[in-house]
Amino acid sequence: MLQPFYPTKLEAEIATKKAGKGKLALVLGGGAPNATLMAGALAAFAERRVEFDVISTSGAGALIGLLYLAPKQGNAVQALAHTREMGVADLLYRAFPVNFKVFNKPGTAADMYRDLLAANPFVQQVLAHSNNSTLNRLAADWLQLMWATLCPSDLSNQSLGLCAHVPFVEQLIDFEEIAQLAPAFYINAYNLTQRRMDIFDKRQITPEHFRAALSFPFIYPPYRLGEDDYIEGAAIDCLNFKALVNDDKANPGCETDIKTIVVFDILGSETLLRKPRDLYDAWVLSIITPLVEVARDDLKLFEYQHNRDGNGQPKRKLLKVPLMSSVPVDQLPDVLDWSSSNLNTLYQVGYEAGVQFCNQHAAELGLQA
């Protein structure tokens, strides 16, 4: 449920400066395996110093958006480039195609175990040198797999999800900084208790809200906030346009005077669909397949129902960053893999697409050509 809020002094100054020009908004959709594709494009935007007035996110887009605006370590470009470290060494991934770095065992004992590992100097040394060479990466990832295997877990047939709720997020994002950000920022999450889509703005977002917004069913159990249970908003609404649509009487958005919207639509592409390679791959595709049509419908609904005036003309300019269509054809069979080579390739493809997009739309982005 959208919560009304009032602009800070900084936001008011920015709004005054841009009065009459209209706001520039960014929509980051879901799609965790392809997060580095978005990260690469945003790194290109950060290098060109593109300034968005509003950023609306769902699913994995929330992580990438917050790394862009409020990284815990380093600047935005460094933080976004670091997403490539989520990948698993290719040789190891081929033998065991599961991302044990991103998806962690659940339970209190598992949390304590991870805290002990994080405080261990040997572990920190291994991770610090993992990028020195391909062999170092393989050795470090193999050790991380062994540590993950030894991790205790309370997973049982009574569990409501397979994994712990993103336990590493505080290491990546400076949550204390979010409320002070100049752009408006939104994350959506579906409220199972109230049966509605809730949208959290930057003054509400904590690690708990973030985890609620990334609780994809079966992978993660529903996340409890107050008296309500939440699942990932992207499971139902892959593109969080609701924060931007202030003319929807049933669910009015918070934003007005938006002139241009830039969209990162990862999921709404048929190139994600293919014949599975094995049973695990079939399970991954069973998650992605319905979301392709959901994301595509979200974009069509916005374009034809919420972005047309009485004469059928667009109310706001909609610019789509061609990320998935930029992926080389020979890379498409591996595009959902968590292998290091795939994430590195996707990041570079995203970066090059972002550079090209900035050059083509310099005027709309407020850049010098």
Image (spheres, rainbow, N blue to C red):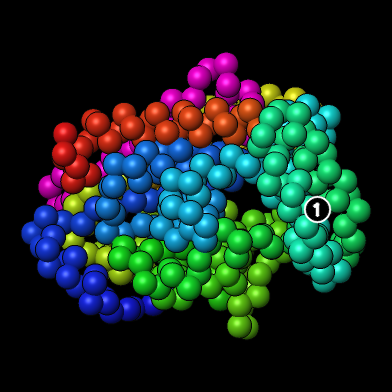
Residue 232 falls in which quadrant of the image? bottom right
Residue 267: image x %, image y %?
51, 40
Residue 351 seen by the camera: yes
Given the current orientation, which residue lies at the most extreme top position?
A: 330
Is residue 335 shown in magenta? yes
Task: Provide the residue designation for mark 1.
Answer: 122
Residue at image point 44% right, 52% down: 75
Residue 361: image x %, image y %?
22, 36
Which residue type does callout 1 highlight? Phe
Q: Report whether 70 appears left or right of 335.
A: left
Residue 319 falls in which quadrant of the image? top left
Residue at image point 76% right, 46% down: 126
Is residue 294 shown in magenta? no
Q: The magenta stretch spans which residues? A: 309-336
Residue 285 seen by the camera: no
Q: Residues within 10 Å of mark 1 (few under 14, many from 20)?
A: few
- Circle 1 — which element? helix
Residue 157 falls in which quadrant of the image? bottom right
Q: Report whether 366 appears left or right of 285.
A: left
Q: Nearer the viewer, residue 76 or 284?
A: 76
Residue at image point 27% right, 59% down: 53
